[in-house]
Image (tube, rainbow, N blue to C red):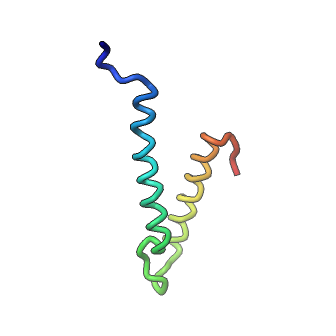
Amino acid sequence: MTTQPNALDTYLQRLPMIRDKIEALRQLTDDHFDHDPDAIHWGHVGDLGRVDQTLDDLLAIFDGEAK
């Protein structure tokens, strides 16, 4: 009996962790990342630009198409 995990086992273990992180991001976006709308500044805009680009990069990895 092997004690080393195989690729499928590890893959399946990681999926729920990724789903949890996606859900956490969804909750943060629903709350505007807990930012006061009256206090939004260009730094926040830049942060969202980086997040948007990173999500595009991730989608390109798995979907094969970049925006």
- Residue at horizontal 47 percent and vertical 55 percent from the top: 22
Which residue in the rendered view is the most extreme toward the top? 1
Above-or-below relation of 59 to 2: below
Near-viewer residue (16 or 39): 16
Q: Which is more toward the observer, 43 or 18? A: 18
The reply, left or right, for residue 59 in relation to residue 67 is left
Indicate whether 63 appears above or below 6: below
Position in image of residue 63 (x %, y %): 65, 42
Report which quarter residue 16 is drawn in.
Answer: top left
Which residue is found at the position 45% from the left and 33% from the top?
A: 11
- 2, above or below 12, in the image: above
Residue at 61% across, 40% down: 62
**Which quadrant of the figure has residue 65?**
top right
Image quarter where the N terminus lies is: top left
In the figure, 28 relative to 15: above or below? below
**Residue ranking furthest to the front:** 1
**Residue 32 position within the rendered picture, expressed as x and y whole percent measured from the top left:** 48, 74
Task: State the image coordinates of residue 54 (x, y, percent, origin top left).
Answer: 55, 52
Number of numbered tags placed on the structure image: 0
Rendering coords of residue 47 (x, y %): 50, 64
Specify whether 56 is left or right of 65.
left
